[in-house]
Structures are given as C-alpha cells and as structure tokens.
Image: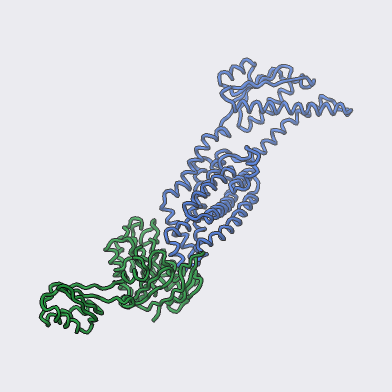
Amino acid sequence: MTVLSCSGLRRRFGDVLAVDDVSFTIGEGETYGLLGPNGAGKTTTISMITGVLERDAGEVVVAGVPMSTRTVAAKRLVGYVPQELALYPDLTGRENLRFFASLHGAARSRVEHVLGVVGLADRADDLAREYSGGMKRRLNVAIGLLHEPKLLVLDEPTAGVDPQSRNQIIENVRTLAAGGMAVLYTTHYMEEAERLCDRVGVIDSGRLVAEGTRRELVERLGERDRISLQLEGDLARAAAVAGAVPSVHGVSAHGHGLELVVDDAREALPAVLSAISTGGAVVRAAEFDEPNLETVFLHLTGKALRE
Amino acid sequence: MRHALLIAGRDLRERARDRTAYLLAVVLPLGLAGIFSLVLGNLADGEVFHYVVADSDRGEIARTFTGDVLGQAASSGAIEVRSVSSEQEARALVDDGAATAAFLLPAGLTQDVLAGRAARIEVVGDVDAPTGTQVARSLAGSYADRLAAVRVAVAATVHSGVTTDPSLLSVEAAAALPQTAVATDTTARRELDAKTRYAAGMAVFFLFFAVQSGVTGLLDERRTGTLARLLAAPVRRSSILAGKILTSVAVGLVSTTLLIFATSLLMGAHWGNPAGVALLVVTGVLAATGVMAVVAASARTAEQASGWQAITAIVLGALGGAFFPVAQAGGLLEQLSPIAPHHWFLRGLADLAGGGSVLPAAAAMTAFAVVTGSIALVLFRKVVRP
C-alpha cells in the first residue's frame, strides 16, 4: 500500500528553482532515502511533504489524504524530525514530549512509550539543555514518533551524534519500518543509507536524477561487483572453471591473480572459490569490490555526498 | 484556542525558569523606581523648605502675604514659615543654615503699595539651598506681580470716574489674592506624587521589555527549528501567532501587577482606584505588546528584534515621560509625547489621582493596541508564511 505519493513537486524562491518536478512514492514498511548534496533541494522537498512549505505545483498525498499547509488531517499522519534539534532546552525531556503530544492529540501514555523506545526514560526529567548531543538527537526523533504516524520523515537525524546514539536511532527506524511505518530519510552518511534504505532517490539541483534500489542504481551505471583472487596453480584452468560459474560475467588474468566481474560478489564468492578449488588451484587471498551509492552519487552529481 | 493556550502555557513555563525574566520584569524596575524616588523624589515632594519672615511693616499688605500667600503654601506641607522679630535675626538664621530663606517686609510696605509708590519685599536666601531660595523668590515675585496688577486695575477704575472708595477697592483686591494659590493647588492634585510617578514610569518602561519575549519568541523558534515542528503539527498558523501574543500579554500583566503591589508595599506608591488602574494596565499591556510585535515582525532575527525593541522602548519611554515629566521640557518634546503609550499610561494614572476619568487614556492605548496589533499580524504572516 502506498503511504506517500508525491508528484510533480515544484517550488521556486525568487529566481531559484529549488525543487523541479520531483515525484516518488513510499510504500508501507518501506524506507526511502533521499540523497543529495547541500542545496540540492532535499529540505525544501521535505518541507512541502510535511505541509510546512506551500508548493508552487504538484501534489502530496499521505495515506490517501491530500497534504497542504492548511490541512490538519494529513498532518496528523506525518511524524516530522527536522534537521535542527527542534527542542525546548529549558523544558525537561518529558515536558517536551508532553507538549508535542498535546499538540498532536496523542495519549499521555505515548510519552512514556517513546521515552522507552529511544532509551531516555531514566533521564526524562532532566532539562533538555543538559542532554548530550546524542540524547538530544534521540529526543528529537522521539517527538516525531509520539502520535504513531503512518509516515515518518527524518531530515538528517544522526548528524553529529556519537556512534552509540546513531546505532540506536538506526535500529529504531528499522524496527518502526518493520512494523509497517513508511520512512523518508535523508542523510549525509552513505553507509546509513545503504544499511537502512530499501530504495533511494538522488536529488541534484532540485531534480530527482535517479531512483531505485542500490543494485538497480549501480547496474544503471553499468557498474558490477568485482572479485579479485590471488592464486597458486594453473591460472588458465582456474580462469576457465571460474568463468563457468553462472553469475560470473567476465574473467581477466593478471600476474598470479584473477579478476572476476559478477552480479553479486557476496553471493558469487562461495561458488567461485569452490569451482577454483575443484580445478586444482589454491586461493591465497580474495577480496571483492561492490560499487556503492557513493560511486553512484559521484557519477550522477559530480560531487561527493558531503560536499 | 486550545492550541494557542498550549503554546502560551509552554512559553510561560519556560519563561518562569528564566531568571533574567524576573530581573527584567520585576527586580530592575523596582530597584530603579526606588533609586529615582530616593534621589529625585526628595526634590519633588520630600524636602521641606524652612522660611522665616521679618515683618517690620505690620500692615495689610504684609499680613496678606504672610497669612494668605505663605500660609497657603505652608498648608500644602512643602514649606514651613515662622516669624522672627527683626531683619538681623532673619539674616542670622539664613547665614547659620537654620532657615532656607528669609522674607524681609520693610516698614511702610503697605503704605507705599496703597499710595502707589515703589515698594519691595526682600528675599535673603541660603547659598547652599538654591532650590528653596528660588521657590521663595517665586512666592514673593508672584505676590508682587499680583499687587502691581491690582494697583493698575484700581487706578483704572478710579480714573474712569466710577465712584468707588479706593481703599475699599484695594482691600477687596487684597482679599482676592489667595485665589491664585488655590488655583495652583488644584493643578497640583492632578499630578502623581514622586514615588508613584517613578514607580509607574519604571513599570511602564520595563513593561515594554517584559512583553517582548513572547512576540520575539516566534523568531527564536524559527532559528531553533521548533517553528518548523509547530508548522508540521496539526495546528493552525493563527493559533501559533495567538499563542505568542498571549504569552506577551500574560507576562506583561503579571509583571506589572507584581510591580504595583511591590511599589505600594515597599515604596508607599499610591496607584489609585484599583478598577481604573486595572483598565490602564490591561490597555497598556496590549499597547506595549502591539508596539513590540510590530518591531519583532519587522526584524529578520531574534537578535535584531531585541536590539530594535530596546531602542524603541528607550525612545518611547523618554518621549512618554517614563524617566522625567516631559511637560517640564515643553516644546517639541512635549508635543511628541502623546505618540508614546507611556504618556497615556502616566496621564491616566494622574487623571485617576486627580479624580478624573481614565477612559481617555485607556481609549488611546486601546487604539495603539489595535493599530499596531493589526500591522504586526500582517507582518508576522511572513514569518509563518508557507
């Protein structure tokens, strides 16, 4: 079931076309990563999806309800975690949650629940200003979960946090998605996107330039996984038996080693090693190279993600 | 409305934990009002001038001056007057600092006045008491002017051929002299005493700082990102604005009420009829909120807004007479004074003290609130504009 449907989103600020004809969907239980360099239009897109910003054109529908800046009904379905630490520092963690719970009409019991989810129950009565950066980030996420939204929108939720808090946030998101929540996620950390996201969209200069799973994007670039092997024994015979493995698309020899082009290095490696061993050669070293989203991103935008 | 109350409640809870807010809204105005009252209040109504009169004339003119002119002034409590037997004694008392000034009424004063001859009342003042000496000179001078006016009027009447006894005319004229003092007294009662004036001046001056937190809070929330969170919540934008304005109004009402009680208890300020004061406080808070909202809505950042608001509060406070009575300065300053809500707040209290109505002042401040509030709402729409 489609939870978020955006089509033809467009927004201009003066002479700058910040978002131009962006369309994508997110299904129930799906995590969608929106990747792009700074100024690409990610936050503007998110602001239109959450009803914070009016759009010049296009449509946003959340679980069948059209979203606009004035639509209260659609906003009830969306949990928003902004990039900034959008907290009140002179309120305690619990008071912050109670305030936003009241605004969203969420039950008081949800406050205690989300405190447990993000691991802040034992510090709930401390002022938010006394929290560490990681705890503030977790509280920031917790506020977005209060009203059990159908769609959770997280804008750089792990920026500048310690590894422990980052892992906790990522695990929280995974659990929520597994429970059926649709998640829209932006990040500067490519490994996060690869770990979390079922699909990603790459946005550059306001346009969605590519969309799909990691593998789909990699293949679209003509890139494939590679396995490099260092061998002892008959190199020609080893190349022949390795090339006969079904997922291997190409073999080249160099020195004492072979380089194989495969669909999925992790899946193909056991079969390749077994075939070479059967052929009488001994594998001294093996390594594989998987073209990642960073490669895709660099190719599509000409920039590294953190630029 | 529920959301507006929730937002205002959150703001107030956070504000209640901010010690700076108490300092600005209560401690500072109370302290400054106390200092002003102590330092300047004595000049205005705390210090009593001690005068002596050496009456060598013992005639009608001297008795009128001593009994009626000086007697009226003495009854107000501003001066004390006692008679001495000779000029030498009077001069000695002034030289010793035992008297602020001495009135020397020479022998033949009454005869000279009634005969139309040149006459004089001599004032001898203490060089260390310039204010008291100046007051003594003013009393003598105004009496002399009045005598001269009466003498001209009498002469004109006699020369016009009306058959009236000149001595009777002069006695009647002399009898009319104290009316001038009575008229002055009526004007004085429409003014606030010094303690109340400084308490009210500081209260209305710092009110403009107290209310700024609510309306500027919107810019703060935009900076920290919580505004985006509020905008993404199922809350109408008008509720967000209303919540911020409610915060300002609540802080203004609470701080001013606290100051009224504190200055009444600690300084002995007399604010006047509670209902009238309440109306002035409510309309004053609304006017201050409106003015500060316009300034905040015109700024790009909370820091810029705070700077502009401080300038606005100081300029309007000075124009409106929060620090000193602008009417004394006269000229352009006095003409500009009504553009400041402070002027109307203080005028309302003075009218209340004089037994008048606070409605004109309350109406003026309501007009301020309506006009500035409307402008602010239009301007604030850009802050929460989609």
Residue B276 higher or lower than A18, as above or below: above
Q: Position of residue B87 (x, y in %)?
A: 64, 16
User: Can residue A236 be seen at all in this image of the molecule?
Assistant: yes
Q: Is A199 displayed left or right of B192 in the figure?
A: left
Colour of the chain lettered B: blue
Q: In the rendered image, what is the letter of the chain coloured green?
A: A
Q: Closer to the camera, A301 or A238?
A: A238
Quadrant for residue B162, please give it: top right
* Quadrant where the N terminus of chain A is found in the figure: bottom left
Quadrant for residue A81, please give it: bottom left
Question: Which residue is found at the position 59% from the left and 26% from the top?
Answer: B130
Q: Position of residue A196 (x, y in %)?
A: 31, 72
Q: Position of residue B23 (x, y in %)?
A: 45, 46
Name of the residue lying farthest toward the top = B88
Q: Is A283 displayed left or right of B30 in the figure?
A: left
Q: Closer to the camera, B234 or B274?
A: B234
